[in-house]
Amino acid sequence: MMIIFEATIKENGIGGWFLQLKDTITQRVEKCDDLKEFSETIEKMGLDYGGHIDEVKWIVDENVPQKHIIEVKEQMAKIQKELFNDSND
């Protein structure tokens, strides 16, 4: 069984964005207002599968402007850099 989550970038209607995280096996959906919340939520949801997730599929709602996509990507890159950068502290 492949454990696949879907992360959808969506507009929040007030000039910003949020991420919708969906477990495609249980159809459970969680709303994350930022990437910090997203990473905590995906970790929690992954615990149902012993912390193992095969794939996270990224989806962008069609009404999401390019600037929000870039924002999410930049924040994601920053978080990944922090995760893998041991010389931080």
Image (cartoon, rainbow, N blue to C red):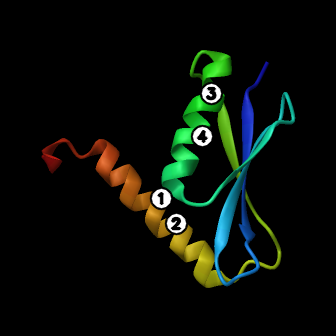
On the rendered structure, is 56 left or right of 40? Answer: right
Instruction: Using the image as rendered, state which of residue 55 and residue 31 is in the foreground.
Output: 31
Instruction: Report if residue 11 is visible in the image.
Output: yes
Eye-nearest disc, 1 or 3: 3
| Label whose residue precedes the other's in the sequence (3 or 4) | 4
The answer for how far apart the CA atoms under marks 3 and 4 are is 8 Å
Eye-nearest disc, 2 or 3: 3
The answer for how far apart the CA atoms under marks 2 and 3 are is 22 Å
Q: Image quarter for residue 16?
A: bottom right
Q: Do the residues labelled 4 and 1 touch (CB within 8 Å)?
A: no
Check disc 4 and report the residue beneath it. 41
Q: Do the residues labelled 2 and 1 touch (CB within 8 Å)?
A: yes
Q: Image quarter for residue 22?
A: top right
Check disc 1 and report the residue beneath it. 76
Check disc 2 and report the residue beneath it. 73
Q: What element carries label 1?
A: helix
Residue at image coords 60%, 21%:
47
